Image (tube, rainbow, N blue to C red):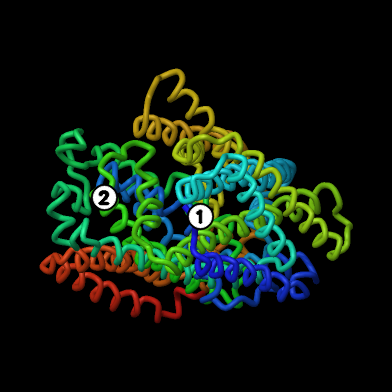
Amino acid sequence: MSLHFVDWLIIAGFLIFSLLIGLYFRKRASGSLESFFLGDRSMPWVVAGLSMVATTFAADTPLAVTELTGESGIAGNWLWWSFLAGGMLTTFFFAKLWRRAGILTEIEFIELRYGGRPAAFLRGFKAVYLGFFMNILIIGWVNLAMVTILNEFFDLEPLTTYALIAALMLLAAIYTSLSGIWGVAVTDVVQFCLAVTGTAILAVIVLHSPQVGGVSGLKAALPESTFHFFPEIGASDSAAETLALSFGAFFAYIGVQWWSSWYPGQEPGGGGYIAQRMMSTKTERGAVYATLLFQTAHYCLRPWPWIITALCALVLYPELEGDALRTGYVRAMKDFLPVGLRGMLLAAFLAAYLSTISTQLNWGAGYLINDFWKRFIRPSGSQRSYVSASRTVTLLLMAAGMLITLMINSISGVWQFILECGAGLGAVLILRWYWWRINAWSEIAGTAAPFVGYAAAHYLLGAAFPGSFFFTVTFTTVAWLAATYLTPPESDETLSRFYRRVRPGKFGKFSENDPSVTTGANFYLFVSWISAVVFTYGILFLTGKIILAEWADAAWCASAVIGAGIILKHALGQNSIWK
């Protein structure tokens, strides 16, 4: 289809604006690696928090939610809703510790917590594994989603589509390499506001279209189970009768996945670009508030426009099934948006895409330069030389990401691979902050074992999810516990240095004489965590119940929100949790 001149004008204006931001922040990013990757640790917590949300709002997420909702109804979204408990755990127990650590990247933490050759090996390996291999896989699946959008919207030839993707990646690489984290974060805020506004407008227009007929028409056209917020345990597997998750899948999501699996943007204990934003804030309190803003906006502000459009797509395009379900979202954009709004929403998808790509390029370059090049290849280089190298690596990552895009055929296949090949590692990433006995070999085993467990579950046992997931988590847990007890602990010097810098609370004999370690602090941290989880789920469900006009349930949700909010406010007011 062709866009109106007004639509093209909106899209062009947005792209030019993104580039201008990169040019504006160029000097601010040129001083040192800390300037380039952490903005001299001077970022307001609101900017840092919104930047986190924008990065997780990629071009693939509305399409993925459309597919999940099409397959399993609203309850299908527990695949990602279940990560909230882990996200809030990071907010209250780890955000201030990341800011306090005084490091440049998540990977640098390894040689703060561990010592000797095993720590050096682990740091170098993870710098390349996460900064390059895992990074370009993520870039590839985000690119593949954008390919789907462009193909469905414009019906382009494959060569033309990939040429457009390459041009967009080049734009992201240019403003990222020029401006560093400040340009990325500020652009993220603008992009997020545009993306949320655009998807909300689409949801309202499609829901109230004559073909759908509002909430009443939507409910009349779809099975009742489609609108259930929780899985129908033991229900029929027939999608024609009911849309339901199996008990095993739901338990894997809500009971195990959030603490056990490494997943980009939802790393147990924090990590990746989430840790980068925490460390870029002005204060430890700012790191906590930024992460709290991220978690609440991530689960409360973004989902319902996607879900409502996805439900409407089931009514509008009943012929879609399987992988084709995700295209219903793009079809709704084409068929129902008028001139101007169509360009706005396409610009919103470009915004979501660019915010994710720019962040992946920035933090990936951070790992490769700070934790590999500077640590092992050129330890005596100047700060300006490291910044120049970072800009070069940003462009190289762009090229590698484009190449991997040509090799990926399935977004969901990459998701499942990443989710299961990090199963079981999460416990190590959480406990290393608080259990002194964890050592470098624990994390090495926890990183390697999931690959063995995944291969054994799928290729030897013939298991499928969730059975394969439970097997991998168990196998990995046994492996890293065995490695922990079969190898000596880190030296007292290493552990004492870590404790003095980070002050995580109780940490074996190293915290025995620390007067700041109190039972009250841990109690209020726990209360903050649980109340924040209830508060956020309450808002999520309250919003949905209001949209669906289910007023009795909405009243119960509102009560939970008010009660949890009061408790959370009281807990955050306790000075002991900030020590």
Above or below — where is 552 with respect to 225? Answer: below
Residue in the picture at 86% in, 60% down: 385
Name the quadrant containing residue 335: bottom left
Residue in the picture at 76% in, 48% down: 372
Whole-percent x, y for residue 426 in the image: 48, 46
Amino acid under disc 1: Gly
Question: What label sits on residue 572 in the rendered view?
Answer: none
Residue in the picture at 77% in, 57% down: 390
- Select label 2 or label 1 by which is in front: 2
Amino acid under disc 2: Leu
Can you identify the residue that label 1 sits on? Answer: 265
Compared across the picture, whether 578 is left or right of 404 comes to left
SS class, disc 1: loop
Can you identify the residue that label 2 sits on? Answer: 316
Closest to the observer: 246 or 330?
A: 330
Whole-percent x, y for residue 117 in the image: 74, 42
